[in-house]
Amino acid sequence: MLAQARKVLERARTITRDDLEHEEDLGAAVAWRLSVIGEAAARLSQATRDQHPEIPWTQIIGMRHRLIHGYDAIDLDIVWQTIQMDLPPLVAALEAIVDR
């Protein structure tokens, strides 16, 4: 999860919201990485998720489901907002867990 989130944030430094829309491969790559984050979260045991309530597990897994099953109607505004607003605190929280 951490590696994928870092890769998305690194890439996001050099792109805009419009780039996601106009560069099909870029949008697909970002969506794929976000879905991998959600898949990894879903594979964690419930006990592990319960130990870290600071992580919004339900929303992360829900994003994965939306990206995978609703691939034909992905809202790039939500994807961009997730990148800009949700990934930085997720990375910080995951780094804190890894550092323990």
Image: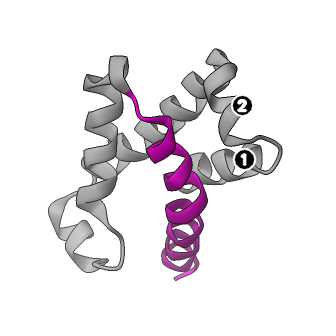
Q: Secondary structure at mark 2?
A: helix
Q: In the drawing, does residue 78 fall left or right of residue 17?
A: left
Magenta span: 74-100
Q: Secondary structure at mark 1?
A: helix
Q: In the drawing, does residue 23 fall left or right of residue 95?
A: right
Magenta run includes residue 82: yes
**Residue 1 showing in the rendered view:** no
Q: Is residue 80 above or below residue 100?
A: above
Q: In the drawing, does residue 47 fall left or right of residue 66?
A: left
Toward the left, the furthest residue is: 46
Residue at 34% in and 23% down: 73
Which residue is identified by label 2?
A: 19
Residue at 72% in and 47% down: 12
Crowd class of label 1 (few under 14; some 14 to 19; many from 20; radius 10 Å)? some
- Three-letter amino acid code of the residue under disc 2: Asp
Residue at 25% in and 47% down: 62
Magenta run includes residue 57: no
Crowd class of label 2 (few under 14; some 14 to 19; many from 20; radius 10 Å)? some
Which residue is identified by label 1?
A: 12
Q: Is residue 36 above or below residue 56?
A: above
Q: In the drawing, does residue 70 fall left or right of residue 74?
A: left
Q: Is residue 62 above or below residue 88?
A: above
